[in-house]
């Protein structure tokens, strides 16, 4: 069906789907904040699991579709390229946030712990790529370890939030995670949860369309799968995270904004597990190239910088944003420039 469409129609479909994803994401952010208040789950954890998982659905569909069609590089780069792009979104949100550095105001132990979990989950695929080519039923053991580590990490982060053994230093600019309206917080969560589920379904369908259009770009223009995955489909399927981050900052839900990005990135590592299962020609990790590992390392480096910023809690840095935001923008810009110079063709 998509192969018969002209370039104009492909671009139009790509643009329309992108707009739908953006609109749905704005509504999903508001609902996630409501769900966090009514369940007592907390913004950081709601951002990590509820919002992070929902906004990642489009990207999941893209990676699985690419892996199932035999394009390991496309599936892999879409996942890890999205992690780098989404980390960049926090730097952009920091630029737009009025007042102090976003990472200072959104101090939350759960977010620190989740950033550490993300670094571990990014290191595991790198070890798989560099290690021996082993698989069981065409699935690498690291794919299973990723799921186990994710479940343990989320459970431990929730325990940390419920029973913290230490707290960040209180300042006048620290923003607390409190319900905006105590009466609303006591209302049932069923209706917003059902609407949220419907929005998630729309994101999933949008992800499938984006995957099909991205595949056409690779076929028609001879572009490298890693280039399309890391810089086209990854950016578009990451738009929900971008929109929800800005919307959360505007609502004053700073822990939701930071937790949504870090949690969404943690969830995105599971793209690799699902893609490895969908890829039937052996281990996904040994079917990718150095350019794909390059984006994995970029995401790992940017996450480490973000973690340093969350610990440092600088009030104001260069251009009224944190030094970690400056560094993340620089790292991502350099990564994009190198990809464009070296990865244009397959």
Image (cartoon, rainbow, N blue to C red):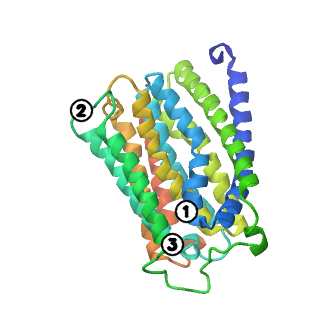
Q: CA distance from mark 3 to mark 1?
A: 11 Å
- Which label lies toward us, 3 or 1? 3
Q: Which mark is residue 166?
A: none
Q: Quadrant of the N terminus?
A: top right
Q: Nearer the viewer, residue 18 or 176?
A: 176
| Kind of element beneath mark 3 | helix
Report whether 141 appears left or right of 307.
Answer: left
Whether residue 333 can be seen here = no
Residue 71: % across, % down: 44, 25
Quadrant in the picture for residue 291: top left
Residue 284: % across, % down: 36, 32
**Dot 3 corresponds to which residue?**
162
Q: Single out the residue that lies furthest toward the left.
A: 132
**Residue at 44% of width from left, 74% of height from top?**
311
**Dot 2 corresponds to which residue?**
133
Q: Which mark is residue 45?
A: 1
Q: CA distance from mark 2 to mark 3?
A: 41 Å
Label 1 CA crowd tier, 10 Å (few <14, some 14–19, many 20+): many
Q: Quadrant of the C terminus?
A: top left
In the image, residue 28 above or below residue 133 = below
Report whether 152 appears left or right of 265.
Answer: left
Q: CA distance from mark 1 to mark 2?
A: 36 Å
Residue 159: % across, % down: 46, 68
């Amino acid at each position: 069906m998509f192969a018969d469409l002209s370039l104009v129609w492909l671009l139009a479909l790509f643009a329309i789907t992108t707009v739908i994803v953006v609109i749905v994401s704005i509504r999903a952010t508001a609902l996630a904040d409501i769900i966090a208040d009514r369940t007592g789950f907390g913004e950081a954890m709601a951002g990590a699991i509820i919002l992070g998982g929902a906004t990642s659905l489009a990207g999941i569909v893209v990676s699985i579709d690419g892996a199932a069609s035999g394009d390991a590089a496309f599936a892999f780069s879409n996942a890890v390229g999205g992690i780098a792009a989404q980390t960049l979104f926090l730097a952009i949100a920091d630029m737009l946030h009025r007042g102090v550095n976003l990472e200072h105001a959104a101090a939350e132990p759960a977010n620190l712990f989740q950033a550490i979990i993300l670094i571990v989950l990014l290191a595991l695929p790198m070890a798989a790529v560099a290690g021996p080519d082993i698989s069981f039923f065409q699935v690498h053991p690291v794919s299973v370890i990723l799921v186990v580590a994710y479940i343990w990490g989320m459970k431990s982060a929730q325990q940390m939030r419920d029973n913290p053994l230490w707290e960040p230093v209180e300042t006048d600019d620290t923003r607390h995670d409190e319900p905006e309206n105590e009466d609303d917080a006591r209302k049932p969560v069923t209706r917003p949860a059902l609407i949220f589920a419907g929005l998630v379904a729309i994101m999933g369908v949008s992800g499938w369309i984006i995957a099909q259009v991205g595949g056409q770009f690779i076929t028609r223009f001879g572009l490298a799968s890693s280039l399309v995955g890391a810089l086209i489909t990854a950016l578009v399927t990451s738009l929900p995270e971008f929109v929800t981050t800005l919307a959360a900052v505007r609502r004053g839900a700073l822990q939701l904004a930071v937790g949504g990005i870090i949690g969404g990135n943690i969830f995105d590592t599971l793209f690799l597990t699902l893609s490895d299962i969908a890829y039937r020609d052996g281990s996904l990790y040994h079917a990718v190239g150095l350019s794909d590992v390059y984006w994995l390392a970029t995401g790992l480096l940017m996450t480490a910088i973000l973690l340093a910023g969350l610990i440092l809690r600088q009030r104001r840095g260069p251009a009224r944003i944190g030094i970690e935001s400056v560094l993340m923008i620089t790292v991502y810009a350099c990564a994009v420039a190198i990809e464009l110079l070296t990865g244009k063709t397959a």
